[in-house]
Image (cartoon, rainbow, N blue to C red):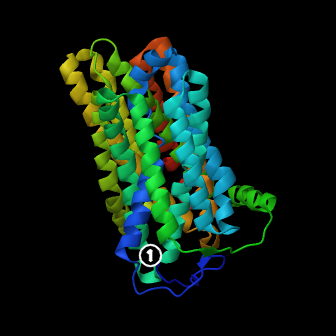
C-alpha cells in the first residue's frame, strides 16, 4: 500500500493519511485506470444487445429503450446525490461499497426473467457505477502535485477505453454466448476490481464535517454563482442528448431493414470511440495553448456536422450507409470527448476548493442529457424512423454550439 500525505495545494482538497511519494506507483495507477474503465463500461454493455435482448424476454422496442435510459438516469442521480459524499467520508469505503452493489446489480440484470426486473437492475447499475467518479479524484489526491495531471489523464484514458471497449465486447459476447453471459462476466470483472481496490487503495481522510443536506445545498449555490458552470453543463448535456440517442438506437436500427445485422456488428461501431480516447489528451494540449473556449466551439461544431452528414444516408446503398454511419460516429465521438475535456478545464478553474462538487454538477447535466437522449431516441425511432433520430441528434448539437457562441459566452467562461 503506497504512502501518501494530505494534499495542500488548495483549501478543502481531499486528504489522505500518509506522506506523498515522489511518483504514484505504476501498479496503483493501473488499478485506478482499470477500475474506472470497468465501472463506466457497465453503463454501456446493454446498448449493442438491445436488438436481441428484447425478443428474448418478450419486451417491445419502447420498453427495451428504457434500459439505457434508466442506466444513464441512475448515473446522473448517483453523481448528484452520492458524489459529494467523497468529501465527507473515506473515499476508499465508498468505492468498495459501490463496487459490491454494482456487482449484485449486474448479476440481477443477467438473471432477469422479464423487463421489470431488468429495468430495476439497470437503475441500480447506473447509481453504483458512479464509483468511476470517485476514482478520478482519488487519483488526483494520491498523485504528487507535479504528476497530478498525468495521473488524472491516465485514469481518464482508462475510463474512455472502458466506454469504447464495452460496446465491442458486449456485442461479441451477446452474439456468441448470449446477453445474460455479458452481464455475468461484467459482474465478475467488478468483483475482481473491488478485491484489488480493497488490497491496494489507502484510506482517505474526510475534509468536511458538513451534513449531507449542506453538501447537496452547496451544489445549488455553485450553480447559481457561476454562469460558466451553467453554460458548460447545458452545452455538454445537449451534446449528450444526441450522443445517447444514436448509441441507444443503433443496435435496433441495424437489426431491421435493410441491414439485418446482429449485436456484434452494432458493437463494432464502438471502435469509433477510439477517436474520443485520442481526443482527450490532444484537446487538453490545445486548451492549454489556445484556451478551452476555442476547443468547446470546435468540438460542438464537429458534432453538429457529423450528425447532419447522416441525413444523406437514404441516398446511398446499404453498404455505403454503414460507412457513412461509421465515419459520422468517429467525428461526433471525437467532438464530444474534446468538448468534455475542455469543459472540465473551464469548470475546474472556477473554484479550486470545490472541484469535486463542480465536477458533480457538470456530470449531472451530462448524464441527464444521456438519459433524455435514450428515451427521446427510442421514441423517435419507433414513431418516425432513423432519420428522426438523426434530426434529433443534429438539433441537440446545434443547440450546444449556440450555447458556446451566444453573445456573452466568452465572458461567462
Front in this rendered view, residue 288 or 36: 36
Find numbered disc 1 in the image and state the secondary structure of the residue it sits on: helix
Q: Quadrant of residue 87?
A: bottom right
Is residue 42 visible in the rendered image? The answer is yes
| Residue 287 appears anywhere in the view | no
Left or right of 152? Residue 172 is left
Left or right: 206 in relation to 324: right
Q: At x 38% / y 52%, what residue is drawn?
A: 160
Residue 135: x and y in percent read 51, 62
Query: Residue 308's image quarter?
Result: top left
User: How many numbered marks, from 0 up?
Assistant: 1
Taking depth in this image into account, of 318 and 349 the one nearest to the observer is 318
Vertical side of 266 occupied by 235: above or below: below
User: What x and y, as percent, mark residue 34?
Assistant: 39, 58
Q: Is residue 67 above or below residue 258?
A: below
Q: Quadrant of the C terminus?
A: bottom right
Spot occupied by residue 277 in the image (x, y as percentages of width and height): 33, 53
Is residue 396 shown above or below 404? above
**Neighbour class for label 1 at 10 Å: few (<14), some, many (≥20)?**
some
Q: Is residue 195 above or below residue 52?
A: below
For mark 1, what is the residue?
A: 148
x, y percentage for residue 227?
Answer: 64, 56
In which image quadrant can residue 323 be found?
top left
Amino acid at each position: 500500500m503506497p504512502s501518501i500525505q494530505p494534499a495542500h495545494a488548495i483549501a478543502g482538497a481531499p486528504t489522505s493519511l500518509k506522506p506523498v511519494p515522489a511518483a504514484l506507483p505504476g501498479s496503483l495507477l493501473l488499478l485506478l485506470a482499470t477500475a474506472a474503465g470497468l465501472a463506466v463500461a457497465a453503463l454501456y454493455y446493454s446498448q449493442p444487445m438491445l436488438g436481441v435482448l428484447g425478443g428474448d424476454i418478450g419486451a417491445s422496442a419502447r420498453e427495451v429503450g428504457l434500459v439505457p435510459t434508466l442506466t444513464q438516469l441512475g448515473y446522473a442521480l448517483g453523481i448528484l446525490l452520492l458524489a459529494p459524499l467523497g468529501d465527507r467520508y473515506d473515499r476508499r469505503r465508498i468505492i468498495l461499497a459501490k463496487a459490491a452493489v454494482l456487482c449484485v446489480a449486474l448479476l440481477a440484470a443477467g438473471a432477469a426473467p422479464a423487463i421489470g426486473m431488468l429495468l430495476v437492475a439497470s437503475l441500480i447499475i447506473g447509481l453504483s457505477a458512479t464509483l468511476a467518479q470517485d476514482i478520478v479524484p482519488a487519483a488526483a489526491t494520491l498523485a504528487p502535485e507535479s504528476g497530478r495531471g498525468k495521473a488524472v489523464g491516465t485514469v481518464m484514458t482508462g475510463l474512455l477505453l472502458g466506454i469504447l471497449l464495452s460496446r465491442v465486447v458486449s456485442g461479441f459476447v451477446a452474439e456468441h454466448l448470449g446477453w445474460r453471459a455479458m452481464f455475468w462476466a461484467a459482474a465478475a470483472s467488478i468483483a475482481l476490481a473491488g478485491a484489488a481496490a480493497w488490497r491496494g487503495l489507502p484510506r482517505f481522510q474526510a475534509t468536511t464535517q458538513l451534513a449531507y443536506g449542506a453538501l447537496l445545498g452547496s451544489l445549488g449555490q455553485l450553480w447559481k454563482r457561476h454562469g460558466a458552470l451553467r453554460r458548460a453543463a447545458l452545452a455538454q448535456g445537449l451534446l449528450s442528448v444526441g450522443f445517447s440517442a444514436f448509441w441507444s438506437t443503433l443496435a435496433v436500427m441495424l437489426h431491421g431493414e435493410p441491414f439485418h445485422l446482429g449485436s456484434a456488428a452494432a458493437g463494432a461501431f464502438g471502435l469509433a470511440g477510439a477517436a474520443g480516447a485520442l481526443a482527450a489528451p490532444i484537446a487538453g494540449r490545445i486548451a492549454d495553448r489556445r484556451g478551452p473556449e476555442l476547443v468547446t466551439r470546435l468540438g460542438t461544431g464537429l458534432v453538429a456536422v457529423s450528425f447532419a452528414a447522416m441525413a444523406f444516408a437514404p441516398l446511398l446503398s446499404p453498404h455505403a450507409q454503414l460507412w457513412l454511419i461509421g465515419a459520422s460516429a468517429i467525428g461526433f465521438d471525437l467532438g464530444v470527448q474534446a468538448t468534455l475535456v475542455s469543459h472540465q478545464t473551464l469548470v475546474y478553474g472556477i473554484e479550486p476548493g470545490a472541484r469535486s462538487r463542480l465536477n458533480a454538477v457538470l456530470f449531472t447535466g451530462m448524464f441527464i442529457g444521456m438519459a433524455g437522449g435514450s428515451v427521446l431516441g427510442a421514441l423517435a425511432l419507433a414513431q418516425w424512423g432513423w432519420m428522426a433520430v438523426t434530426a434529433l441528434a443534429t438539433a441537440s448539437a446545434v443547440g450546444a454550439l449556440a450555447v458556446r457562441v451566444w453573445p456573452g459566452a466568452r465572458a461567462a467562461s
